[in-house]
Image: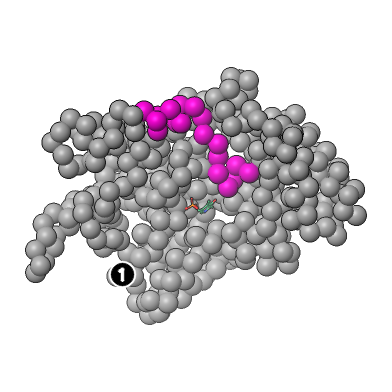
Amino acid sequence: MIDIQKIRADFPILNQTVNGKPLVYFDNAATAQKPLVVIEAIEKYYKEINANIHRGVHTLSQLATDAYEVSRNTIQKHLNAKHSYEIIFTAGTTFGINLVANGFAALLKEGDEVMVSHLEHHSNIVPWQLLCERTGAKLVVITMNDEGELNLDEFEKQLSDNVKVVAVNHISNALGTVNPIKEIIEKAHKVGAAVLIDGAQATPHLKPDVQELDCDFYAFSGHKVCGPTGVGALYGKEEWLRKLPPYQGGGEMIAEVTFEKTTYADLPHKFEAGTPNIAGGIVLGTALDYLNTIGFENIASYEQELLEYATEKLLQIEGLKIYGTGKNKASVISFNIEGIHPYDIGTIVDKLGVAVRTGHHCAQPIMQYFNIPGTIRASFAFYNTKEEIDIFVEAVQKAQVMLS
Ligand SMILES: *Cc1c(COP(=O)(O)O)cnc(C)c1O
């Protein structure tokens, strides 16, 4: 069960007015708000521990290193990875995907294929396009249907021994579709392809089990799971992390450097060049602990309630169309109102205190599929309420009246 009053008290930012109205924050798919434990942990780190990690013999450096590695273990347990050295600290999902795509440049050749889906965020498209340009590999797209679901039958036909990598998101940020990634991973593995899962949008709503999924890579961002920006994690199966070359060169990632030859540090440090976002890394663990205290089952069932409630209320508005009507959805609603530009609605509801995202949501191919410039996207978190949805729906209705 969700104790909503208690939870909202954890998020000071929610308790304010915007444009003279109580803030209704429905842009959680872009970034989540931070609970006090996270804000305080950042302050505590800089007030009491700040030192560089893995380097000093001095006490503070050890404290910082220990806290950083404790967080790595927290992430390992959270994702149920087999080894803590399979967890690489990154700057976020984008960084993690680029790390993997860059590594595959050493393994691909002309004629190989890389598959992404029509539902991807640009950060799970462009790094693979860059890889294809460098290697002569071909980018192949897994198609979607009008509900915003991937066509698995067609995917199976597209698979061949040429496919070396399949990169799909666990949940679509633009439509909310929950993809059947276990099935996708299984099918891709039959032809020997590695599978990267973009978990940026899934990790705020569910607890992935990378061993059960059997994915080869799983990337996510701290800031979408109530943690800080500029930090994230990449899970990689040990055998793949050993196969891929380092992404960046620098301090921290080496075993020995001479001008003739440099040998690399063991996992995970091989992929962690330079001084990282130490506070961010430590506090990412704090954020996951916080979410686990609330419980992902509680989060998921509460958010589903919000999703159903909002969907039903929005559909009562004349001319409103929801994009992404698949059976399996997270608490994201993308929609438009006939004859009105999404940006105009976004601007008016903001004046009424409601924060939503408008535009293409970094997923232009989805907008091209539906032949629209963009959508209005409301995305709910476990700290949102039905009362907020009422305010939001009323704001959309007001905007509709003003704009038509
Ligand atoms: C937010 C998001 C990303 C990008 O995450 P960054 O934190 O900007 O690196 C990638 N994919 C999906 C599905 C997302 O929602």
Q: Residue at x 23, y 50 (%)?
A: 269
Residue that label 1 marks:
107
Q: Residue at x 9, y 63 (%)?
A: 258
Residue 11 sits above or below residue 136 on the image: above
Residue 283 horizontal side relative to residue 258, left or right: right
How did the renderer colour the structure?
A: one colour
242 and 281: which is toward the camera: 281
Q: Position of residue 98 (x, y in %)?
A: 40, 61
Residue 256 horizontal side relative to residue 161, left or right: left
Q: Secondary structure at mark 1?
A: loop
**Residue 29 forms part of the magenta stretch:** yes
Residue 266 horizontal side relative to residue 7, left or right: left
Q: Position of residue 343 (x, y in %)?
A: 74, 56
Q: Bounds of the magenta span? A: 27-44
Q: Position of residue 234 (x, y in %)?
A: 37, 49
Q: Residue at x 15, y 33 (%)?
A: 58
Residue 73 sits above or below residue 37 on the image: below
Residue 170 sits above or below residue 384 on the image: below
Residue at disc 1, CB closer than 8 Å to ligand 1: no
Residue 234 visible from this viewpoint: no
> Which picture quadrant has residue 103?
bottom left
Give the amino acid at mark 1: Leu
Number of numbered markers:
1
Residue 333 horizontal side relative to residue 239, left or right: right
> Which picture quadrant has residue 70?
top left
**Residue 293 forms part of the magenta stretch:** no
Residue 195 sits above or below residue 66 on the image: below
Q: Residue at x 40, y 33 (%)?
A: 42
